[in-house]
Amino acid sequence: MWQLSSQGTYSVLAQAEEEVANFKSQIESEQLRLDAVRLMYETVKQCREEALAAVAGPVEEAATRTLQRIAGERLGRLQLGESFEPSRVLPEVLEESVALDNVSGGEREQIYLATRLALAEVLAKNERQLVVLDDVLAATDAGRLARVMTVLEEAAQRLQILILTCHPERYRGLERANFIDLEE
């Protein structure tokens, strides 16, 4: 109490007002930084969405065409998620989309293969890209496997395709394939 009375009421008030002004200045500065970070975040988010949309559309279209060549039109259009992973199919006969968990294992394999080939082809506009497939068709039936071989032969004209498999006999239909047995 003695200390407060010795400083005088005016000087205590002046010091408090100065501290309040400093705090207000700091708050304004932090608010400006916060606004700048928000603006930067929103700008990056918008640019990312635009870039993804520019690539996702062509990839979805190409994947859908490839999938229809393999499996027919029954599965309809393919829909990709944010990370270019197939998320749903939109059959024309249904009003709602179907999650990939609700299609057979073979169809799911074909959907993922079609998506990977489509993404590689979109990215390969300027140069030939490598596509690595690791036993991607283990559950695909013989009829669709034959159609997949045709798709792979055509894709191999624009892409370099490396297939790792424990079932090389499934790929013997690839006419220009180079088979390497790692056990020899």
Image: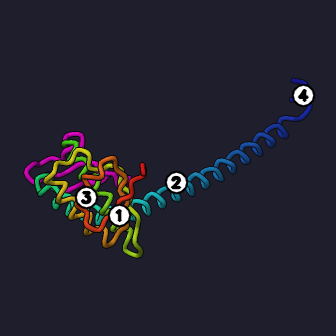
Label whose residue precedes the other's in the sequence (4 or 2): 4
**Magenta-highlighted residues:** 77-103
Can you see residue 53? no
**Given the image, on which type of amino acid does mark 3 rest?**
Arg
Q: Quadrant of the N terminus?
A: top right
**Residue 13 sits above or below residue 121 on the image:** above
Q: Alpha carbon of mark 1 to alpha carbon of mark 4: how far? A: 92 Å
Task: Give whichever of 49, 39 is nearer the camera.
Answer: 49
In the shown orientation, is residue 1 left or right of residue 146? Answer: right
> What residue is disc 4 on?
3
In the shown orientation, is residue 70 left or right of residue 125? Answer: left
Q: Alpha carbon of mark 4 to alpha carbon of mark 2: how far? A: 46 Å
Task: Give whichever of 75, 57 is nearer the camera.
Answer: 75
On residue 172, which mark appears? 3
Name the outermost residue toward the left: 93
**Given the image, on which type of amino acid does mark 4 rest?**
Gln
Q: Alpha carbon of mark 1 to alpha carbon of mark 3: how far? A: 10 Å
> What residue is disc 1 on?
178
The kind of secondary structure element at disc 2 is helix
**Residue 94 sits above or below residue 114 on the image:** above
Residue under the image location 28 percent in, 48 percent down = 87
Label whose residue precedes the other's in the sequence (1 or 4): 4
Task: Give whichever of 174, 106 is nearer the camera.
Answer: 174
**Residue 62 sits above or below residue 17 on the image:** below
Between label 4 and label 2, give the one nearer the viewer.
2
**Given the image, on which type of amino acid does mark 1 rest?**
Asn
**Given the image, on which type of amino acid does mark 2 rest?**
Arg
Q: Residues within 10 Å of mark 1 (few under 14, many from 20)?
A: few
Q: Position of residue 103 (x, y in %)?
A: 19, 43
The kind of secondary structure element at disc 4 is helix
Label whose residue precedes the other's in the sequence (1 or 3): 3
> What residue is disc 2 on?
38
